[in-house]
Every structure is written in C-alpha cells, then in structure tokens.
Image (cartoon, helix red, strand yellow):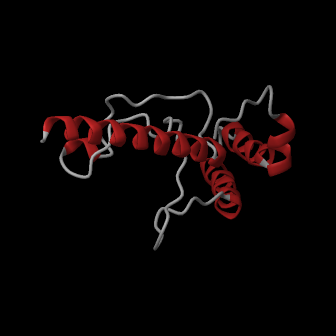
Amino acid sequence: MGLDPKKDQALIEKIGLNEYKELLDAANAEKLDTNARYEKYAAAQAWLTENAMVLPIYSKGGVPSITKVTPFSGARSSIGIKGDSNFFKYQKLQDKTVTTADYEKAYKNWLKEKEESNKKAQEELAKHVK
C-alpha cells in the first residue's frame, strides 16, 4: 500500500494495521505448538478479511484504478496494437499516484494539443489537395 512504518506510524495505527502486525508477530513467535500457530495465523487472516480495503475490479461504467503512469503519455490508437494496455512505449511514470486533479489537468492539455494537431493537419491537407 506504500506505507512506510517509520514515516506513517500515525496512519498505520489509525487504520489498525498495527493490530494485524501484532497478530502476525504472535503467530510467528509460536514455534513449538503447530496447532496454536495455525490458530494464531487464522486469527490474523480473519482480522485481515474483516478489515480489508476493497477495490472494485468490475463496473457497469467507469472502472476505478490506481496508477503512476502519467495520463496521456503513451501512444493511443483505436485500432492496431498501440491502443492495447500492454503497449508501454512512450509511457512516463511519475513518483506519486495519479490523482483526479492530475488526470483532469492532463486531459485538458491533451485536448488542447489534439485541437492544435488537428488544425495543423487540416491546413497541411488543404495545401496538399487542390
């Protein structure tokens, strides 16, 4: 999740991950009694299941995602292989996760660049076709 135990201790405690770590440490510390060790791991797993953060993977509309790929930095195409999500050429990564504000800013910039590019292409076409 990108949490640093040294820097993010307050957040770790707020969301309860310290409780999970205590359960794991207790299970790891049990060396002699296998059944007790499994029960402690089961308790840790139960805690994790009860407190898990869920990221939906399917939707009948927009699909939420988490990425560090700078929006609109890669090649785009409606046909061929360049529209494929596994085509990484030209993609740029940023240090932090893309926020909605980052995406919206990149989208506005992309629209502006697209308009300029289309205008230039139309002017060149008008010169070419007479």
Residue 130 is left or right of residue 107, and the answer is left
Residue 29, x across and y down, in percent: 71, 37
Query: Image check: 29 left or right of 123?
Result: right
Q: How many marks?
A: 0
Q: Horizontal placement of 116 versus 16: left or right?
A: left
Q: Residue at x 36, y 37 (%)?
A: 117
Seen in the picture, residue 64 relative to 12 is either above or below; the reply is below
Task: Specify whether 104 is left or right of 81.
Answer: right
Outermost residue on the left side: it is 130
| Residue 13 coordinates in the image, percent (x, y) | 85, 44
The image quarter containing residue 48 is bottom right
Q: Which corner quadrant of the image does residue 92 belong to?
A: top left
Q: Name above or below for residue 46 compared with residue 115.
A: below
Quadrant assignment, res 114: top left
Q: Position of residue 52 (x, y in %)?
A: 66, 58
Which residue is at the front of the view, 126 or 3?
Answer: 126
